[in-house]
Structure formats: structure tokens, C-alpha cells
Image: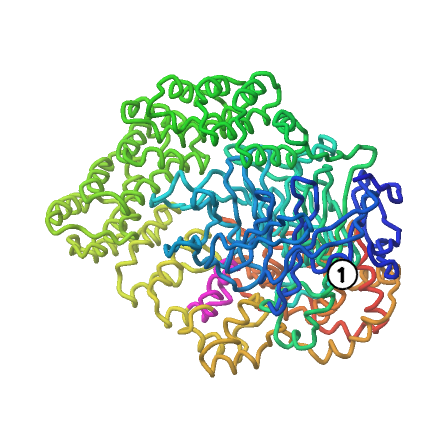
Amino acid sequence: MKNSALGRATGFFYLFLILLLPGCQDQPVDLSGFVLHPDFEMTLVAAEPLVTDPVDLEFDANGDAYVLQMPGYPKGEDQSSIVKLIDTDKDGIYDEKVLYAENLNQASSLLAYKQGLLVAAPPDLLFLKDENGDGVAEVRSVIMTGFSNGNLQHNFNGLTYGLDNWIHLANGGNGGGTRWVDSDSVMPIDGYDFQIRPEDKLFQWSGRTSGGYELAMDKWGNFYGTHNLHHINMLVFPHRYIEGLTLNPRNTLRNISDHEENGLARVYPIGEQETRVNHPEQSGYFSGACGITYYGGGSFSPAFQDNIFVNDVVLNLVHRNIVEEKSSYYSAARGRAGEDFLTSRDRSFRPVNSVVGPDGALYIIDMYRQVIEHPEWIPDELEVNMDLDAGKGQGRIYRINQKDRELFEWKKPGGEVREWIALLEHPNLWTRMVAQRTILENKWNCAAELTALFSKTKIPETKIHILYILKDMGTDLTTLLIAALNDKVVELKRHAIICSEPYFKQNDLICENVMDCARSDDARLQLQTVLSIGQFPDKYADEAFSIITDVLTRNLDDPYIRIACLASLRHRTLHLAGYLKKHPEMLAEEGGEIMMEMIAYRLSQAGTSTEMLDLLELFPARTPEEEKALVMVLEVFARSGIKLPQADVSEWTRKLNELEKERSLALLSSLWKLRNSLGVPLKKNIDAELTRAVELIHSNQSDEREKIEAIQIFDFADLDRVRAELLPMVDARNPIQVQEAALEVLISQDASDVVQDLVDRWKMLSPTVRKRITDLLIYNPENHEILFSSLESGTLNLSEFNFDLERRRRLLKSKDDDTRKRAQALFSDAGVTQRREAIEQMRPALDLAGNEKAGEDIFNVQCATCHRFGSIGNEVGPDLTEISRKSRETLMHDILDPNAGADPEYINHIIETEDGQIISGIIDEETDDALFVKMMGGMERSIPKSNIKSLSSTGLSLMPEGLEGVLSQKDLADLLAFLQHPVM
């Protein structure tokens, strides 16, 4: 394929071209709405009618392009098909197609495999092949079947050929199970991505799924997934290392984005934004992440090599991540501040997927739909007015290449194996993977040639490919593994360790070299060493234990090294606990506390009664560190619901009675929970301890930790005493953790009276506590009467509840008739609107052209007292600098109906101090000792909790209602124009 240079512009690359659709010269495609990174250029290489509804693109070993088309989205009425694209004049633009296969159910992914294609077409995994060269697949066979076929967004997908010669697939979220077509044995998928070897009928879980569309594999064989809000997740290490183990946490999937705030990653769309009625807070943030793609094409400059691109189909953009090693896992940074790699003003641009081609270019697959949101997440009253098929039958594919850098020209080698082996040194990962797959598929006898290249090449990636090829060929790798284990390149050493695992039982030299790798300062290499050492034969048990615990000591704060250490010492869990006891400085750290919790959980699920008792005996509570560890163990055992053999009850009772002699309330509380769980009667006088707890709670000499421990003992008090002593503690004048501890005990009583008590104290509660109570009111049906009565009477306000789509639907779709009717009287599936008349009065403003300068003047008069926009105004309420991410309609609602969708964070509070001051404003921050309040005009006050006489919530936004009384429709149009102008 040839480069196709498009127009250039300074700063950004604006595509002001109108190109004719390939294969249909009378329908122009307007590309003027695209903004691309200035170092790159973009070419339209295929569009409707050549391709329609495209969702995936695959290049086979010939370099031929196959496009998977999915017209059935979202209703599932039409079946998927595959077309083979042809570039007849070799100008880099496709102009003909052949229908390769049709009637593929709702297929969503394809992979070149054995001169054909594997296709994810639930309920089946299909193999297709064109045997006579006419471009049409005559062979069609089912490899696996039984896959779930539910919400089309969540079907299995992501077919990827791995460095390890397994085929990896993404779960997608529908779960279920599958089986080989010639077997009745069902293999559960559950919540995991998985990998297969069809020729050997092998299946195994890869790791916890992200639940989204597509997988990405980097040059080191690491896998990444994506899903809607969380755009880039990394599988830190494969599930096989913890297979069958009862661990907490149970998976090794990590969100590696370093640019999230409150669980959302900001992106920068440029088109006019659509109204997000389901989740308005997601406007301008990733919410439709999909099509994750690693760029290892070798054509881009080093700054863009190894980047990971993620598309957002809702916001019409492609986002770039710079991925770097952080510890045992990677971290993904934003490619550019305030800008995305590719954006479009065309709201129908839907980049569902991306792939890297044989030429090293990045190909963007645009499904091109007016509506991309699945109807499951569109409010019913809005869906009836939408054409969910608008744009169906269209679609585009774009090629992106870097300016002034050459693309590769793919020429498939002939039958000479040496030509294919030479490609293992190619800069393009696609080329190297095709070579690896082709060598194995042809079963060429070329171990000698591969070994020679391993010794000659300076490219570590090439050596890794060779190791996995030779491993699959059954070649003895001892010499190569020893060399790789002593190489300077960490990733080569890591893969050498993995490939060494089958040699552990019979090759001491390899074991010794693997153990040496643990001395590295690289956390990722240490992680792999620990995981693999867990498979050493028993004769290495003591040496392996020493190495693993040394790695743990050096990396105690690393969550994945903690998991790896426990997994590899699965048969020596008590020894690991003993090691921690000998190192109290480790138990004093948070990582040591978590490790102790993991050990206790592991034994509670898979240990014997004797082993669990031995763990209790290990910590006599003589030191603060031992007591802390013992409390943790007791808490975990109590939560886990362990069952004792009858023969062991007396010995456990003896130990529990012995522990009950302790004075620590924290220890007693945990101990009593365990006794209750085991059905062993309490021995100590509870009333006496409760009296002591009350004294500690009210004593000025008690520190925060002592108060919290005293509060927790009330788990064993009767309801009346709990209410009497703990309700006063849920007060914004108390330290946060004290409030939360009291709230936890109150909630655990599971009594509606307690919930009503909390609602009655609503105005005195801190924002953090209020949020927890709103969850109780919404998600527990027993509390719905309190919820509706409080809202209907005005005791509580809708603005304090963050009624997003899921929270509204919890009530609107209740099975209880009364709940549904009362919810419908407050809001609809489309949202919360309290000032409908004012909104309808001003709605014509949405159709008026606004004047930004006039809007700035209005902002200065009406808004700047409490809001900042760029360098203008005061930051009391939300900073509006990036408010252009919201639609005009959403902004109008926010302005005219501020209490309908107010963030509870910006509710107005009134504070009366002991010295008689009255302060009104937003609680910006709460610490154990003070409240920090922002007042109108931007003034900030720090108010010591000891000086607060009363605190009350108005239940309303600080922003006043009634702006329609001072703004004309033209004024509102001007203000909207100003707010939607991005601040540069």
C-alpha cells in the first residue's frame, strides 16, 4: 500500500477533503470534520457500499484484507458477513470486494488461521476457508459451540494469536460456557477471558475479563482489555498461576490508566455533544471505550511506537496511551494534554475497532451509525423517537500513517523457510506474528536455522519468538534458555523463565539460573520468578521459600507480588505467616496487614481446622503488631463462616476462652464475632465491656482509634442501646472515621427504625454519611416507604440523591406497584425534571445562534460569583472550564433546574459556630478536625469541629433557581455559546 498525503495545517491536521466513496463515485464523504494529531495523515481506503457496518478487519498472510460486517447491531435481526477487499490498481485504495462468507449469526471478531479465518459467531466459533482461490469460503466448520448470544455488545470477541501460540479471546461480558463441537463436556467461561488450542482441544482461562470489545497484545505478550468507562486494563499475570486457589483478591486484572478522576478518564471530543440523560456526569469522559489496539507496527517514530490506542464510539474519537512499566504492572499516561489523537465533529463517526496492517499503518474501522448506544441503556421514552438503524448500511475504513515516514510493502515469501525465519527480525509485530504462525502451521523442520538466528540476532523480541516456536516444536531449549536467563534484557529473561517451567523437575542448572533472576531490581521480573518458582520440585522448598520471602520483603506494597508469593507458597501458608511474625516491621505496614488478611482467608477456605488454630496460636497478642494481626485473623475467620469438625470444638473453645481474658476491645469484638459464627457461647460479661466502651466513647482522653474500637463492640448490644449510644456519634462534628464506624454498627442492625432515625438527623449528617444512607434508601426495598415519604414531604430533596439511570430504574422498574407509581410521580426514565415549565419557556434558546462575547458578559454578572471558567470567576461551585463537554440541552437544564441534577457535593450548608457566627456555603473538604467551606464570592473558611454548634443542610444547590426571570431566550443562547466555547 502506498502513502496518500492529505492536506496539512499548522498545529492540528484538519482534513478539509471531500473524498469520493471507493467503489461508488457519486457519494462524497466529507472529512472536513476530523482533527488528527499534526504528525499524522489519514486516508479513506474503503467505504459503503464496498463495506457496510464494519466491526473488524483482518489481514491474512497474503496481505489480503477481510472485513467483518455486523448489520444486526443492536437488534440482532440481520446476520453478519465477511467481505474480502481488493485493490485492483495498487493505489492503496480498495475498489472491489468479494463476499467471502455470510449468515454468520452475530459474528463480531475474526482471525487469520491455517490459510482461513476463525470467526467468533455465537453460539459458535467457526473456521472458514477458501480452497479454490475464488475469494469465497467453501469450507465452514464449527470448532466450538455453546457461547452465550445475549446483548451484542457483550458477546465473546477479540480473537488474537498470542506469543505463546495459544489463541486468546475476550469474554465480552455474557459469560456462560462452551464446549468442543465433538464433546458434551461444557467448559465454564464465567467472568474470564480465555485461550484455546483448537488442534489439541485445550481450553483455559486467561484472566478476569474487562467485559468489553477487543483484546490487545503488546510485543512482550502482555494482554490489555477495555470496557466502557475503564478504557485500559492490564492482565498483570495469567490466571493459570492461581488456578484452583481460594484467594482474595481472586484476579490479576488492573486498571492502569493514570488519568482518571473519580473512576472516569477525561477525553476531548470536538463535535456538538449529545445529551447524556442516563449518566450526565459521564459527558466528556470515556463511556464507550472499545477497540483497544497496541501499536507495534514499526513505521511510527519511537514516541508513538508501543502506544496503545483506545476508541470511544460515543464521543467519536481515538485516544492514545503511552504505556510504561511502573512496578510489577504498567501505567498508561495520556498521549497529549487536552487533546486526543483523532476526533471528529461528525456524530455518526463510530470508531468501533482499530488494527495494525502489514504496512505498519493504523487502520480505523468506523461502523458509522447515528445511534450507537445499546437500547438497554436508552430511556424508554426517548427510544421510541429514535431510529436505531439510522446509518445502517454505511461504514468506512481509514488508514493512518505518520508523515514523512515510510510504510512497509508486504511481499509474502515463497515456500523457502529461511525467508519466513528472516521475518522474525522485522520491525512490525504483525509481520513477526505471521511468520511465527506460518512456520508452525507448515511444520517446517527448521530448528537448526532458528537456533542459529537466536545466537546471531541482537533483537530481544526475535529471540522470544524463536523460544516459543521451538518450544511448540518440542525442541530441547536448555542451551538457549540458559543464555536467555543470563541476558541483560528483562523481558527476554521473563519469557525464558516461562519457557523453562517444563524443565524444572529434571534440570538443576535451569532452576539455579531462574532463582538468580530474583536478585533483579525489576519488579516485573521478580514477579515472574516468584510465580514460576512455585512450580519447583520439593527439594528446592527451603531455597524457594527464602527467595520468595525476600522478594515479598522488597515489594510488600505491590499487590500482585503479594498474590504471587501466596500462590507459590500455597502449601506453606503457615510458614509464610511465621515469617511475617518474625518481621514485625512488615506487620506494621499496610502491605503486611493485607498479606496477613490474605493468609487468613486462604486458610479459612482451604486450610484444616488444625491449621487455622495454629494460625491463632502463632500470635499471642503480646505486641501491638501481634494484636493487630490476631484481630485481622479473627475478623476474617468470622466473616468466612468456617465450620469446625465436632472433634475440634473443645480445643477451639479452649483457645477462644484464653483469648477472652484480653482487655483490648478490638480483640474482644473480633473474638465475639468469631464465637457467634462458630456457635460457641460467649463467656465474658458483655454488659461490663459495653459500659467500658461508653466511657471510652465519651472520654476526652480517648483517641480516635480507641473510640472506633469502643463503637465496634456495640455489634453485641441490643438495638435500643445501639440507637441511644451511637446515633449521636453520626454527627458532622465528629471525626469522619468515628462517624463511619458508628454508621456501620447502626446499619448492621438491619432495622427500618435505624434508617428512620438517620433520616430524622439528616441535616446534621456530613455529605459522606448522607451518600451512604441514600444507597440504603434506594437499594433496600424495606426502606422505600421511608424514602418516598421523606421526598414527598420535603424532608429530603431529589437533588441530594444523584438519581442516575440505574438508581432511577431501581425504583421505576420495581416489582412493587406502589413503588413504581410513587417513583413515576417524582421522575421518569429520561431523568429528573423539577422545573419543566421554565425549561419549556426557554427551550427556543437552543435554536438561536449565540454570541460568545455577550455570553461572557452574562457569565460575569450571573455566574462568576460562584463558578470559574478559564481565568474568569471564582471556584465555589463546579469549575466550568471544561463544561463544553456537555450538550447545549444539558447545560440549559443545569442552569434553569439546578436542583434536579445537582451533584450532592455542591449542596448548600448552614453552620452556626459556638461564637455566634452563621456561615453559608459548600463543604469543600472534611477532615477529622475541621470543615472547609467555600462561600459565594470564592472566600474560603476553615471551621474547627470543636467550634461548630450546629450544622444543617438546605438540601438545595447553592445555585439559585429562577434565572429565566432575568435572562431572555437570546441571553440564554449567548450564555450557552460562551460556555460551549473551549478554553484554549
Could you say where residue 612 lies in the image, as x and y percent from the top left?
22, 42
- Mark 1: give few (<14), some (14-19) or many (20+) Cα within 10 Å: many
x, y percentage for residue 637?
Answer: 27, 48
Is 257 rendered above or below residue 229? above
Q: How is the image coloured?
A: rainbow
**Side (left or right) of 235 relative to 188:** right
Amino acid type shown at disc 1: Arg
Q: Quadrant of residue 386?
A: bottom right
Farthest residue to the front: give it: 132
The quarter of the picture where the N terminus appears is top right
Main SS category, magenta section: helix
Look at the image and give the residue range highlighted in magenta: 758-778
- Residue at image point 53% right, 80% down: 792
**What residue is rendered at 39% in x and 54% in y?**
183
Front-most of 639 and 103? 103
Q: Residue 761 colored magenta?
A: yes
Question: In this orientation, which residue lies closer to the viewer: 918 or 589?
Answer: 589
Relative placement, left or right, of 562 versus 824 is left
Q: Is residue 285 visible?
A: no
Does the segment drawn in magenta span residue 760? yes
Nearest the viewer among 266 and 493 is 493
For the image, the number of numbered tags is: 1
The residue that mark 1 highlights is 347
Image quadrant where residue 915 sits: bottom right
Q: Give how far across and how far down residue 703 sits, in percent.
A: 38, 45
Residue 57 visible (yes or no): yes
The image shows residue 77, relative to residue 396, as above or below, that is: below
User: Please, what secondary structure does the residue beneath circle 1 have?
Assistant: loop
Pinpoint residue 511: horizontal percent, then vertical percent. 38, 21
Residue at the location (72% across, 63% down)? Answer: 369
